[in-house]
Image (cartoon, rainbow, N blue to C red):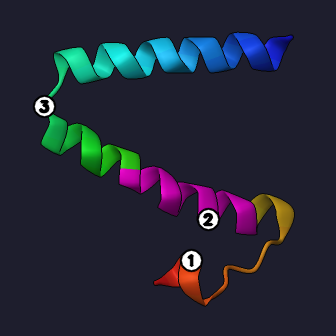
């Protein structure tokens, strides 16, 4: 149930952000999530990034 609430809030915030912000800035922030996910995956779950992740 908590995941459903968090996903709903995430979608709502994302739509609000696209309405209020510039697409060039928001796009860069969205791509930075990939980097953060790889770092957190390595630090928290000992996931080794593969070649495609690093590229």
Our reading of the magenta stretch's main secondary structure is helix
Say which mark, if any, is on residue 38.
Answer: 2
Q: State which quadrant residue 18 falls in.
A: top left
First in residue order: circle 3 vs circle 2: 3
- Seen in the picture, residue 52 relative to 16 is either above or below; the reply is below
Instruction: Say what secondary structure mark 2 lies in.
Output: helix
Q: Residue at x 75, y 80 (%)?
A: 48
First in residue order: circle 2 vs circle 1: 2
- Left or right: residue 31 versus residue 49 is left
Q: Position of residue 16 (x, y in %)?
A: 32, 13
- What residue is disc 1 on? 53
- Seen in the picture, residue 18 relative to 36 is either above or below; the reply is above
Q: Which residues are magenta?
A: 31-42
Q: Residue at x 72, y 62 (%)?
A: 41
- Left or right: residue 50 versus residue 55 is right
First in residue order: circle 1 vs circle 3: 3
Q: CA distance from mark 1 to mark 3?
A: 27 Å
Q: CA distance from mark 3 to mark 2?
A: 26 Å
- Seen in the picture, residue 55 relative to 21 is either above or below; the reply is below
Q: Residue at x 30, y 20 (%)?
A: 17
Q: CA distance from mark 2 to mark 1?
A: 8 Å
Q: Position of residue 30 (x, y in %)?
A: 38, 45
- What residue is disc 3 on? 22
Task: Find out whether the residues at labels 2 and 1 contact each other: C-beta distance under 8 Å.
Answer: yes
């Amino acid at each position: 149930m908590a995941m459903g609430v968090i996903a709903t809030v995430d979608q709502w915030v994302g739509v609000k952000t696209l309405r209020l912000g510039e697409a060039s800035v928001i796009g860069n922030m969205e791509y930075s999530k990939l980097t953060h996910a790889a770092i957190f995956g390595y630090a928290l779950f000992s996931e080794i990034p593969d070649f495609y992740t690093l590229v």
